[in-house]
Image (tube, grey):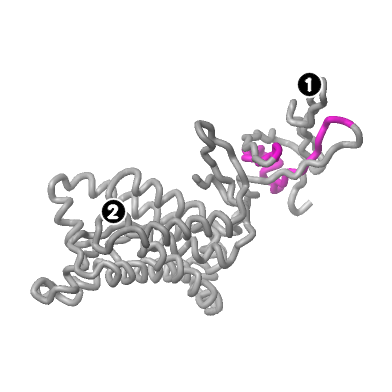
């Protein structure tokens, strides 16, 4: 299952989440320039359990060098698909956690989850010589926090069914619960110390995120965070909007609503809408022309209901302008 978008609107631009994605990408580009030296970087800045479990090895490192990998490992990645998958999940789920916690507390939360995931991996792979890298543990913490804060949010998900792909809106508790189940199952079936995916680090990060998100939410915001939120407040409606069309009397036409800000109504906008078609969802890009007003009806031809003779009605989107 591949998440495309969630339906929870973020009120502020996710400055920290975006910065984390940028830093990870920059570090990955730096990795590509290292050539044969990359393996040394993984062993020095990744988490290698043997460095902590074997005293004959640990004596060669300072205390700072032993602590540092718990931070640096979460910014290193093993390949293009590794970083793409991690950053996509962070993009989907991170903005809402940052919106709830605020920028400063979100950064602390993210790093805390990453460190906790690293510690869980260390103690569940005691003695392993294989370096562990990646942001997966920290991102798992973000997903754990999301499950606690937004269990009934909907995730627009691309689901493969045999040789076809369909879009469905899946409740967050189902999507994230399934993801956690896969991690637990895979972790239980993978021998300790084996290479590959750090399944228990994912579980550790997820549980940490679920535990600490509410605790950090209760900590008062700092003055700096309040100032930052003043500058990062969004002035746009969500890019993805779920449409719940209703039939127009006995006709085949349907009618739903789309929300815009007054600025978007004046200048025009491009929105991704999710239209139900049976059990699945059909995502569509809709271009909103400039100069629309409250109550304007936009016609989407052929997206209404159909009858037994093959006739199909239209879908009309009624514009609602925030603040009007």
Q: Mark 1 points at which residue?
A: 310
Judge from the rendering whether residue 294 lies leftward or rightward of residue 123; answer left or right.
right
Q: Which residue is drawn at 80% across and 43% down?
A: 294
- Read off the magenta span: 251-278
Badge number at residue 196: 2
**Membership of 178 in magenta stretch:** no
Determine if the magenta segment contains residue 276: yes
Q: Which residue is at 32% across, 60% downward?
A: 74
Decide if residue 267 is on the left or right side of residue 245: left
The one of 316 and 79 positioned closer to us in this rendering:
79
Horizontal side of 52 relative to 99 (left or right) equals left
Q: Residue at x 66, y 37 (%)?
A: 268
- Give the alpha-carbon distance from disc 2 to disc 1, as whole Å: 52 Å
Give residue 296's position: percent from left, percent from top.
80, 37
Kindly indicate the quadrant of the structure image that contains residue 100: bottom right
Which of the 4 image quarters holds residue 299? top right
């Amino acid at each position: 299952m591949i998440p495309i978008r969630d339906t929870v609107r973020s009120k502020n631009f996710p400055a920290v989440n975006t910065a984390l994605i940028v830093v990870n990408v920059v570090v990955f580009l730096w990795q590509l320039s290292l050539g044969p030296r990359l393996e040394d970087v993984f062993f020095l800045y990744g988490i290698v359990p043997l460095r902590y479990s074997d005293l004959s090895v640990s004596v060669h490192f300072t205390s700072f060098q032993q602590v540092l990998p718990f931070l640096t490992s979460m910014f290193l990645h093993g390949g293009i698909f590794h970083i793409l998958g991690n950053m996509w999940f962070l993009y989907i789920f991170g903005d809402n956690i940052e919106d709830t916690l605020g920028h400063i507390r979100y950064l602390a939360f993210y790093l805390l989850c990453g460190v906790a995931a690293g510690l869980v991996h260390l103690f569940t792979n005691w003695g392993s010589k294989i370096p562990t890298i990646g942001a997966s543990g920290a991102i798992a913490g973000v997903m754990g926090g999301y499950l606690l804060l937004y269990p009934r949010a909907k995730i627009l998900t691309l689901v493969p069914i045999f040789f076809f792909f369909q879009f469905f809106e899946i409740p967050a508790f189902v999507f994230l619960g399934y993801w956690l189940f896969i991690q637990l199952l895979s972790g239980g079936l993978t021998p300790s110390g084996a290479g590959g995916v750090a399944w228990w680090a994912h579980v550790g990060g997820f549980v940490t995120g679920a535990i600490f998100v509410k605790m950090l939410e209760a900590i008062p915001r700092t003055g700096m965070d309040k100032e930052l939120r003043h500058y990062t407040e969004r002035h746009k409606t969500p890019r993805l909007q779920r449409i719940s069309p209703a039939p127009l009397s006995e006709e085949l036409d349907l009618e739903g609503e789309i929300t815009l800000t007054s600025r978007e109504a004046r200048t025009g906008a491009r929105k991704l809408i999710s239209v139900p078609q049976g059990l699945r969802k059909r995502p569509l890009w809709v271009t909103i022309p400039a100069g629309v007003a409250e109550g304007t009806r936009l016609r989407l031809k052929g997206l209404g209901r159909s009858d037994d003779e093959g006739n199909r009605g239209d879908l009309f989107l009624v514009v609602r302008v925030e603040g009007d």
